[in-house]
Amino acid sequence: MCCCNGKVQLPLLKEAPRLLRQLLFDQTSPDNKKFQQNIRSYNSMFAFTSPGMKFDDTNKGGRGPPIIRIQGQTCHRIGSLLPITGQPPKFGQLYIYDTDNEIQN
């Protein structure tokens, strides 16, 4: 991958953790087949997460499109399954809303 006629070189990605490499590529791993069959479900779980990162907004206010720079490792934050009593549901909690009513219907 290059930019500016090769003047900017992006660093190579770090090697994936050993367990993930086994699940993705090791056909002899006992968990490989199950992981491959359910990989879309695992990926969909992250649709209800919020990204966590160290955010750097020093490049704000320019004339071009907004720029976001993320430093360090990113993670996914997953909230509780149900909202705190008296609080409105948010994020993934909206998909598990008023289950007692749904069970009765």
Image: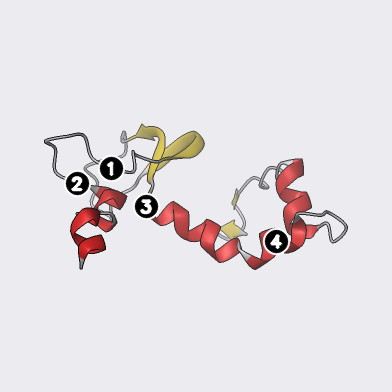
Task: Give how far apart the Cα atoms at labels 4 and 1 are.
Answer: 29 Å
Task: Give how far apart the Cα atoms at labels 3 and 4 are.
Answer: 22 Å
Q: Looking at the image, which residue sits at the far right?
A: 28
Identify the element where label 3 is drawn.
helix
Where does the image place residue 29, in percent across and percent down from the top left?
A: 83, 54
Which residue lies under the disc numbered 2? 89
**Identity, as a three-letter code, of the amino acid under mark 1:** Leu
Q: Nearer the viewer, mark 3 or mark 4?
A: 4
**Identity, as a three-letter code, of the amino acid under mark 2:** Pro
Position of the C terminus, as image quadrant, is bottom left
Q: Is residue 47 above or below residue 40?
A: above
Q: Nearer the viewer, mark 3 or mark 1?
A: 1
Mark 3 or mark 4: name the one nearer the start of the chain. Answer: 4
Label pair 3/2, CB-CB below 8 angstroms: no
Which residue lies under the disc numbered 1? 82
Which residue lies under the disc numbered 3? 48
Mark 3 or mark 1: name the one nearer the start of the chain. Answer: 3
**Identity, as a three-letter code, of the amino acid under mark 3:** Phe
Label pair 2/1, CB-CB below 8 angstroms: yes
Q: Residue at x 36, y 33 (%)?
A: 56
Q: Is residue 43 above or below residue 86?
A: below
Identify the element where label 2 is drawn.
loop
Which residue lies under the disc numbered 4? 34
Q: Is residue 14 above or below residue 2?
A: above
Tell me where residue 6 sits by quadrant. bottom right
